Image: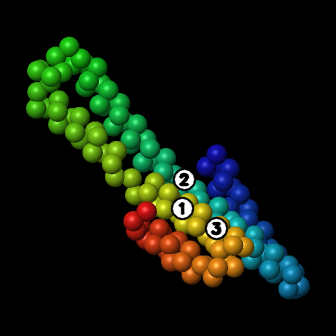
Amino acid sequence: MESNIKGLVAAGHEMASELKAECGAVDMRSVAKLISYLATQLEVQLVRANALAAENALARKAVQAFCDVVGDSTEVICEEIGRDGVLVILEAMKATGNMPATDAFLSEVRAQGVEMMREHPSIKLCSLTHICDELAAQLRKGGSQ
């Protein structure tokens, strides 16, 4: 899938360059800009998806390490696991708690939801759009939810 997306990104940028060079019409230039913008956004989403996949792979490994330790020690877990076993479990669990790309992605999704709400007629009627703008900005900064 990644190579397909990279191919689409490259094709989009190439097509935009060709349109800019060959067509003098304003409409074609705006189409070229749009294609270039879409290709760039596709590339941004690929980078974001790869970061999320890497974090999720780390989380799966951490959970597997936890399961391996517990599975190997089920009969004596309370008495015999020892300091090293406890440290392995704690390190594995700690690794799953730090996922900045996932957190940023979820913050962006929340902010986009607020922006969608901002467009509702009742929000506009009550002049509450500025509150939606402030909340979306706060969510993007990682503020309290």
Front position in the image: 50 or 12: 50
Residue 75 in the figure: left or right of residue 49 = left
Q: Amino acid at mark 1?
A: Arg
Residue 17, percent from left and from top:
75, 75
Count how many numbered circles sit on residues in the image: 3
Between tags 2 and 1, which lies in front? 1
Q: Amino acid at mark 3?
A: Met
Q: Amino acid at mark 2?
A: Ala
Residue 128 in the figure: left or right of residue 70 = right
Mark identifier at residue 91: none
Q: Label 1: which residue?
A: 110
Residue that appears at 45% across and 47% down: 54
Local packing at callout 2 (Cα closer than 10 Å; few below 14, some 14-19, many 20+) is some
- Considering the numbered disc 1 on the image, is that residue within a helix, a strand or a loop? helix
Does residue 24 lie above or below 68 as drawn? below
Residue 39 in the figure: left or right of residue 20 = left
Q: Label 3: which residue?
A: 117
Q: Label 2: which residue?
A: 49
In 3D space, how far apart are the residues under numbered discs 3 and 2 (Cα atoms)?
Answer: 26 Å
Disc nearer the start of the sequence (2/1): 2
Q: Say which quadrant the C terminus sits in.
A: bottom left
Disc nearer the start of the sequence (3/1): 1
Query: Can residue 36 be seen from the camera position used here?
Result: no
Can you name the residue that lies furthest to the top here?
A: 75
